[in-house]
Amino acid sequence: MSALPRRAALIAAVCGVGVLMVSAATAAHREAGTVAASTTMVFGTETDPALLDPSLVSDGPSLRVTDQIFQSLVGFKLGTTNVVPKLATNWTTSKNGLAWTFQLRHGVKFSDGTAFDANAVCFNFNRWYSFPAPLQSNALSYYWSTVFGGFRNPAPGNPGPSASLYKGCKAHGKYSVSLLLTRRSSSFLAAIGLPNFGIASPTALKRYNADAGTVDATGVFHPTGTFATQNPVGTGPYILKSWTVGSKLELVPNPNYWGPKPSLTRVVFVPIGDTAARLQAFQSGEIQGFDGVNPADFATIKSNSKFKLLQRPPFSVGYIGINQSIPPMNNPLVRQALAYGVDRKTVATSFYAGQGTPANQFLPPALFGFAKKGVPDYSYNPTKSKQLLQQAGLSLPVKIDFWYPTNVSRPYMPDPARNFQAFSASLNDAGFNVVAHSAPWRPDYRAGVQAGKDQLFLFGWIADFGDPADFLNVHFGSKTAQFGFDNPALFAMLAKADGEPNYAKRVADYQAASVYVMKFLPVVPYVWASSAVALDANVKGYVQGPIGPVNEPFANVSIG
């Protein structure tokens, strides 16, 4: 089937008559060379959200939607990573850094009419800290685990209160609340600005059984309650009207929103996994914007006066993940052989249309803590790779199971299959026998990776906030199923870096940690990539940020 009929069939199936009518009108105005005003925007996304409970997701498509529905105590200034007030108007810190007291915005209501207050804040933080055992997994409560580290009642094998950054929450009347920590954290404030820590209505969480459900063997949550699928209730400018997985998700304005009313009265997210299909839908007027633009298409969009391209800085990293709990990846010589056996430079320079830079470490250069010296050089060297495998006592070729996702395009891997094929070829020439595996991004691939099922896997990371803790501590600051290693020295190094209040010392600590990670090799980073959003030229008020789909609100957007 050709690309155009496949795209047309997909859009017809997913959008429905109402959306197609809007798209047809938009296309007609384009052809006539006029500018059409509209209060509906149809936006193409890489895939469906996983869930609409931000505390149980970690992927961009989920966070893009939930960021319109929920708000955190703090947020980020548009276009930057600077922390600004959101549901809290100001805050203070105790001298020892262990108590953060927030003054809350008055008169705010959740979209179900429940009052927002200090008790609601504590209800949410205590809910996350007290997640039932099935939800205590990297595939679900990833951000709680990586930012706060432990649970009140840990499931077998999970960290408990002794490992937790969170100690408790204390309300001081209706509009003042203290979050109590067990140790100093310099990244804590920015971390809680993530959509994952959006405050939900306690009434809705209870009424719609937010924590009820089962988790399958791959780590996918199958809720029996409806909070995460039909009734996400926050304080943000939009509320969920409907969601049909594989078809469309529609938001409408929150009638109880405390801030300025949004101009758009309908925001429709349409999942289109193929980058070429998203571009075609955009060019034909069936969508008015989309994320995950293929770098190869940047020039095409820029050259058309009807469109505009909003580029983000290179604030993401693509990597080959390694699960050390699956031998022989527990052997550092094998991990080094893998690093030498991957032709990273060719992929980074050839597959990203000039928008990719070969990565020599996990931290992007834009972040403080980026190591300027001392990083091991793993330039492609298949002969050295074979020597290291033999030194490890293995017979060549060494069989490895290598996974890649389907039905998705991410800034750090616009075409996952193409990246996989290139890496597989270079590894097969370097003493390995690559066995290919693939799975759909939603829900199987991500859940399988984060549950520790995959030996090697293509993955990546787009910054959530402008701090090296968001890269290094989040991934390597504690034991996780995804990477399957226990390295107390690395954990202590990263905890020290995060707790250091002196900026210069903190920079040095993270530079040392970045070098250490590349010697230890829990992953093989291969590209720092920029990303971009494509929009119709008459879309106004959309501000791209350095941290991708997080903090790119549609409430500020208008068309016409």
Image (spheres, rainbow, N blue to C red):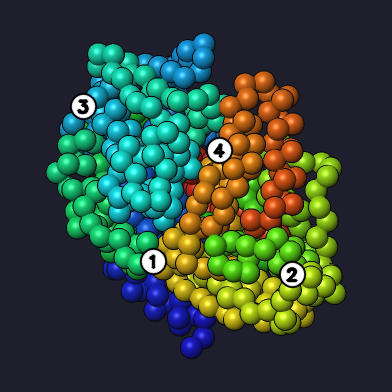
Residue 356 figure quarter = bottom right
Work out how far the residue at label 3 is from the one at label 4, CA to CA, in angstroms: 29 Å
Name the residue nearer the viewer: 378 or 468: 378
Q: Which of marks 2 and 1 is nearer the N terminus?
A: 1
Q: Which amino acid does label 2 sit on?
A: Ala
Q: Which amino acid does label 3 sit on?
A: Ala
Q: In the visual, does 157 lie left or right of 207?
A: right
**Which residue occupies 48% across, 56% down?**
481
Question: Tag on residue 218?
Answer: 1
Determine whether the residue tagged by mark 4 lies in a helix, strand or loop: loop
Determine whether the residue tagged by mark 2 lies in a helix, strand or loop: loop
Name the residue nearer the viewer: 219 or 407: 219
What is the crowding at mark 3: few (fewer than 14 residues within 10 Å), some, or many (at least 20)? Answer: some
Q: What residue type is labelled 1?
A: Thr
Q: Mark 4 points at which residue?
A: 465
Work out how far the residue at label 2 is from the one at label 1, CA to CA, in angstroms: 31 Å
Q: Name the residue under label 2.
A: 392
Question: Tag on residue 115?
Answer: 3
What is the crowding at mark 4: few (fewer than 14 residues within 10 Å), some, or many (at least 20)? Answer: many
Q: In the visual, does 201 lie left or right of 377?
A: left
The extreme left residue here reads 207
Name the residue nearer the viewer: 12 or 138: 138
Q: Which of marks 4 and 2 is nearer the N terminus?
A: 2
Q: Earlier in the sequence, mark 3 or mark 1?
A: 3
**Which residue occupies 43% across, 19% down?**
100
Of circles 3 and 2, the one toward us is 2
For the residues bearing labels 2 and 1, Cβ distance under 8 angstroms: no
**Which residue occupies 60% across, 47% down?**
487
Q: Which amino acid does label 4 sit on?
A: Phe
